[in-house]
Amino acid sequence: MDVRHFPATMLRAGLIGLASAGKSTLFQLLTRAADTGGRASGRDDAAMGLARVPDPRLDRLSAMFSPRKHTPATVTFVDMAARRGSGAATLLDVAPYRTADALLHVVRAFRDDAVPHPAESIDPGRDARTLEDELILADLGVAERRIERIEKDRSKGAWKGDAAELDVLRRCAGVLEAGTPLRALELDRADARRLRGFQFLSAKPLLLVVNVDEADAAISTEDAVRAAGLDGFVHGPAVRALTVCAKIELEIAELEPEDAAAFLADLGLRETGLDRVIRATYELLGYVSFFTAGEDECRAWSIPAGTVAQAAAGEIHSDLARGFIRAEVVACERLVARGSLAACRKHAEVRLEGKDYVVRDGDVINVRFAT
């Protein structure tokens, strides 16, 4: 996929993991590409691909309106090829990961003699710690260099910046020196803004994807995390975990939808691991979806939770934000249940909201605007 075809504003998640963890296989499955042509930042070993966010609500709207176009929300995944030797991906100076909104850490918990582990043993907890330490050390280097530069400028009387920046960087360095990722550090909004430009890797929300054996595909995430020795990594709102069996996902990808559904049912699964990974990534990034629906197009729009109506209108088109008057809003489930907007209006379920209305996940919106 040509990078020029990616949307200007992307939800971007970087896949990280040691060699042979199944990271690149997962990337290819997520983006439905056996050989991804997209390249990030000019690096030959960095690939980008779009994954559609599964959303039954949008499917129901399309079934109702029979639109000419069906457009789901998307997440962009970035994959950096792992380097053999230490077994770790090269992360320390890689722009695609620095600019990612979240990280997906693929951890190997499956055994396969045909795919040897670089460390010659399966230990998910060790592998997770290895890569976590890489992130922490990379961030510590960034923080220390900035602190050194500020202190040098201050000694010359040349520092004109924000004194609070040095304080928060020292806090970060202390946390990192203790071997703790920055996502565990509580920051107020002002300090979070001061750190935004540093793009710290260990501060990014993290989704642990445990790649399990076929026999473990249907066990709960809690049991899989416990069995893999990953309990210590899953804490706080910025970290989530789920399980996937990449081997099974490869088999499912070759099946027709009806056969895939039957195969999942035989395994005791309700949906594919890929769908769960995509949805969990979307939620981890703190985004919700609102919809526009009609005969031309049914579309899911991605916005951060807490976005107001005027800003949401701007996601559709800047003219809608500039000329915003009111938003006609109805909950998707009510629209589907009633069968038409006219029926929703008849039952007073379509609301007129102003520019400061906080858009809810699942709202179907029609923007009234002045030209």
Image: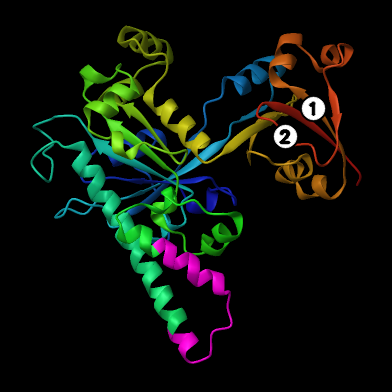
Find disc 1 in the rendering and name its residue: 329
Q: Is 333 located above or below residue 129 in the figure?
A: above
Residue extending furthest toward the right = 370
Q: Residue at x 22, y 31 (%)?
A: 228
- Give how far across and how far down residue 3 sits, in percent: 48, 52
Give the labeled residue for mark 2. 359
User: Could one spot residue 39 in this view of the protein?
Assistant: no
Query: Which badge, 2 or 1, is on the more N-terminal residue?
Result: 1
Left or right of 181? Residue 288 is: right
Q: Is 243 contained in the magenta span? A: no
| Amino acid at circle 2 | Val
Residue 158 highlighted magenta (yes or no): yes
Magenta highlight range: 152-172
On screen, residue 41 above or below 309: below
How far apart marks 2 and 1 lie (CA) works out to 9 Å
Q: Residue at x 41, y 53 (%)?
A: 182
What's under tag 1, amino acid-wise?
Val
The structure residue drawn at horizontal position 22% and vertical position 39%, both measured from the top left corner, is: 125
Question: Residue 170, how many percent across, how many down?
Answer: 43, 67
- Which label lies toward us, 2 or 1? 2
Image coordinates of residue 76 in percent, x first then y, are 48, 44
Cβ atoms at labels 2 and 1 below 8 Å apart: yes
What residue sits 37% from the left and 71% below the top? 144
